[in-house]
Image (cartoon, helix red, strand yellow):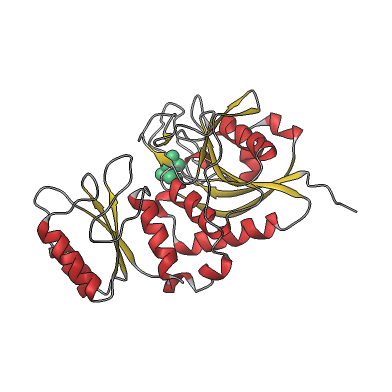
């Protein structure tokens, strides 16, 4: 009878890590989501040291990540983590929306076993692809961490709450804002630099049970010089359910934008105010604050609140 948690399940969803270009020198003109998760595992031979299973959950460019795939992925992660023989789950993903997926999974599942997302900035066909090392590091972290949704890129371990993609091209594309990474992976060894932040309890899969095509419409807008309320009025006219506004500085809004958002709120549209600054919380103010969540994570949070 199998009673030891000794295997790691790797779920493939696509991304540049699974991308292919016609030319090995081309790190941008590739098509994402071309290589299967089995092939990605084979491309990192030291992974043979681990007991692995793979499942192809999706095969897309994460700029096109959608609610149906999130639902599928959350259910797959939950199903595998519930198996006593499974130690952890690793997910290969595109870098573009990785932080949103990580935060979504953390809020929905708050997993008691590690769930580690990884990705690559260069396609699998590159002269020096970063995917194989990132995948190997992610599996190593999955085997050594205890719980929660983490991301591993370029030898650094990030938590779902603070993780952000901060560079459009560099291999070192992710950062944990305000705190720095939670840890480092060095020759397969996980070295913690800080404690995992306290996280809220899981909302549960029941929260996202509704058919994905019926999930609320939450739009993201910004304050900037000359911002007025016309965009908000257009969204209201189209039936938006929630609006996250990335304010300037401490979530500040132009008078006209603020008035339009208060009008939207009075008409039943949920509004959440974040900041377009790269770091820091939104404190005080009239419209509800998203705390220190980035605008895209505030959007996930509002989506999940509206699904309640
Ligand atoms: N557009 C790609 C994706 O997010 C970028 C990447 O993976 O680096 O799937």
Camera-side residue of 104 and 247: 247
Q: Where is residue 255 in the image (x, y as percent from the top left)?
A: 11, 58
Residue found at x 78% / y 51%: 85
User: Relative to 299, is 39 on the left or the right?
Assistant: right
In the figure, residue 39 lies in which quadrant?
top right
Q: Where is residue 185 in the image (x, y as percent from the top left)?
A: 59, 28
Residue pushed farthest front?
A: 284
User: Relative to 114, is 223 on the left or the right?
Assistant: left
Residue 191 seen from this side:
yes
User: Relative to 165, is 193 on the left or the right?
Assistant: right
Which quarter is ligand 1 in?
A: top left
Residue found at x 33% / y 42%: 280
Residue found at x 50% / y 49%: 102
Quick check: 30 above or below 301? above
Q: Where is residue 63 in the image (x, y as percent from the top left)?
A: 39, 50
Q: Where is residue 149 in the image (x, y as percent from the top left)?
A: 56, 47
Camera-side residue of 175 and 54: 175
Rendered-image quadrant of the N terminus: bottom right
Quick check: 210 above or below 165? below
């Amino acid at each position: 009878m199998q009673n030891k948690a000794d295997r790691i399940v790797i779920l493939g969803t696509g991304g540049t890590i699974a991308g292919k270009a016609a030319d090995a020198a081309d790190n941008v003109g590739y098509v994402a989501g071309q290589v299967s998760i089995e092939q990605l595992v084979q491309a990192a031979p030291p992974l043979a040291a681990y007991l692995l299973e793979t499942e192809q959950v999706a095969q897309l460019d994460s700029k096109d990540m959608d609610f149906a795939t999130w639902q599928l992925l959350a259910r797959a992660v939950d199903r595998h983590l519930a198996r006593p023989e499974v130690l952890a789950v690793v997910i290969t993903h595109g870098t573009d929306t990785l932080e949103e997926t990580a935060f979504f999974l953390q809020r929905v599942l708050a997993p008691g076993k590690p769930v580690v997302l990884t990705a690559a900035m260069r396609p699998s066909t590159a002269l020096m692809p970063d995917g194989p090392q990132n995948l190997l590091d992610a599996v190593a972290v999955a085997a050594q961490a205890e719980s929660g949704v983490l991301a591993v890129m370029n030898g650094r371990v990030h938590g779902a709450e603070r993780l952000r993609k901060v560079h459009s091209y560099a291999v070192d594309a992710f950062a944990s804002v305000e705190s720095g990474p939670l840890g480092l992976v060095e020759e397969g060894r996980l070295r913690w630099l800080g404690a995992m932040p306290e996280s809220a309890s899981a909302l549960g899969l029941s929260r996202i049970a509704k058919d994905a095509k019926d999930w609320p419409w939450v739009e993201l807008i910004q304050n900037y010089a000359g911002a007025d309320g016309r965009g908000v009025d257009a969204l209201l006219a189209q039936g938006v359910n929630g609006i996250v506004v990335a304010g300037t500085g401490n979530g500040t809004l132009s008078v006209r934008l603020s008035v339009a958002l208060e009008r939207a709120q009075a008409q039943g549209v949920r509004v959440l105010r974040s900041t377009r600054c790269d770091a820091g919380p939104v404190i005080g103010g009239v419209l509800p604050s998203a705390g220190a969540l980035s605008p895209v994570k505030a959007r996930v949070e509002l989506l999940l609140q509206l699904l309640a």
